[in-house]
Amino acid sequence: MTSRKGVKAVDAWSLVHVASGVGLAVVGVGPWLAVGAIVGFELVEGGLRRISVKGGGGLFEYESWPNVVTDVLVGVAGYVAVHAFWPGLFPFGV
């Protein structure tokens, strides 16, 4: 086992990713755009991780592949949960 941040698939940031999915659903973003935004953020985050800052490291902390995949899945789960539990939230469809 390692104590390095970002190695665990589920961490405290998982709650933020769920909230982002919920937020995208509540503001009425369509499903494909929501998934694209969630995956796109992970891509941007991965790129910014490579930009060095003073004191070493990047703008974002290290994340393992299981962590990245889980971030995407829990974000999408948050989006789906809003539509599953509140189907009438968007009467004209999204």
Image (tube, rainbow, N blue to C red):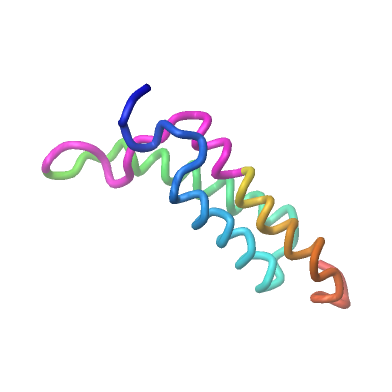
x 86%, y 75%: residue: 88
Residue that extends furthest to the left in the rendered view of this protein: 55
- Closest to the observer, 78 or 50: 78
Stretch in magenta: 55-72
The C terminus lies in which quarter of the figure? Answer: bottom right
**Residue 62 belongs to the span the image colors magenta:** yes
Seen in the image, is 93 located left or right of residue 54?
A: right
Q: Is residue 60 above or below residue 90?
A: above
In this picture, is 67 found above or below 85? Answer: above
**Res 18 → quadrant:** bottom right
In the rendered picture of this protein, how many numbered marks are placed on residues?
A: 0
Query: Residue at position x 56%, y 62% from top?
Result: 19
In the rendered image, the quadrant that contains the N terminus is top left
- View extreme (front): residue: 1
Quadrant housing residue 91: bottom right
Q: Residue 16, image x and y in percent?
A: 49, 57
- Along the horizontal axis of the image, is 75 left or right of 53? right
Q: 89 or 15: which is nearer to us?
A: 15
Q: Position of residue 12 (x, y in %)?
A: 44, 50
Location of residue 89 in the rendering, given as x and y in whole percent from the top left corner: 80, 76
Q: Position of residue 9 (x, y in %)?
A: 51, 35
Whether residue 1 is in magenta: the answer is no
| Residue at position x 12%, y 44% in the image | 54
Side (left or right) of 13 relative to 89: left
